[in-house]
Image (tube, rainbow, N blue to C red):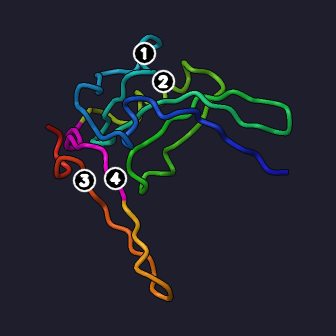
Amino acid sequence: MAFLNWLGNAPVHDPIYGIDHANITKELTGSNWQMKAIVRDGLYIWVVRGYRSDGDKRIYRYYVRLHLVEHKALKKDFASRDRALAYANALGSNEGEYPPERSPVTYMTLRRGPSRGAITREIPVNGGVKQ
């Protein structure tokens, strides 16, 4: 039987909308985790609430997400919000260097005609640099 994880709409501090240092805080708490991310050892980390669907049954969880794919093993989910926040806050011994601020990125795909493959290009908004 397959599970479906649903994390809802991405929060404002999700990197798909770019990275803004104003969305980074020193520590995730019960009052700020829905609007803020943290940086630990240079990793951009945030928590989202979602659910796993098993037929008609929904099992709600808190998911600790990391911006860089190569750190996928550190992503975890928890039944308790407080445990997820504690895990996220403990992922590193210090903040480290913040990731560079950037605007969201748009992709455009063009079909060049029959029997010619489509091409996809990344189109950074504002040149990829946050204004």
Q: Mark 4 and mark 3 in contact (Cβ < 8 Å)?
A: yes
**Amino acid, disc 2:** Leu
**Amino acid, disc 4:** Thr
- Callout 4: 10 Å neighbours few (<14), some, many (20+)? few
Q: Residue at x 35, y 36 (%)?
A: 92
Mark 2, mark 3: which one is toward the viewer?
Answer: 3
Q: Residue at x 47, y 39 (%)?
A: 65
The percent position of residue 103, horizontal first and vertical second, equals 25, 43
Residue 124: mark = 3
- The residue singled out by tag 2 in the image is 85
Q: Mark 1 and mark 2 in contact (Cβ < 8 Å)?
A: yes
Quarter-wise, where is residue 109 in the image? bottom left
Q: Quadrant of the C terminus?
A: top left
Residues 64 and 87: in front is 64
Q: Residue at x 31, y 61 (%)?
A: 122
**Amino acid, disc 1:** Thr
What is the distance, in whole Å, between disc 3 and disc 1 at their CAs?
Answer: 32 Å
What is the distance, in whole Å, between disc 2 and disc 1 at their CAs?
Answer: 7 Å
Upstream in sequence: badge 4 or badge 2: 2
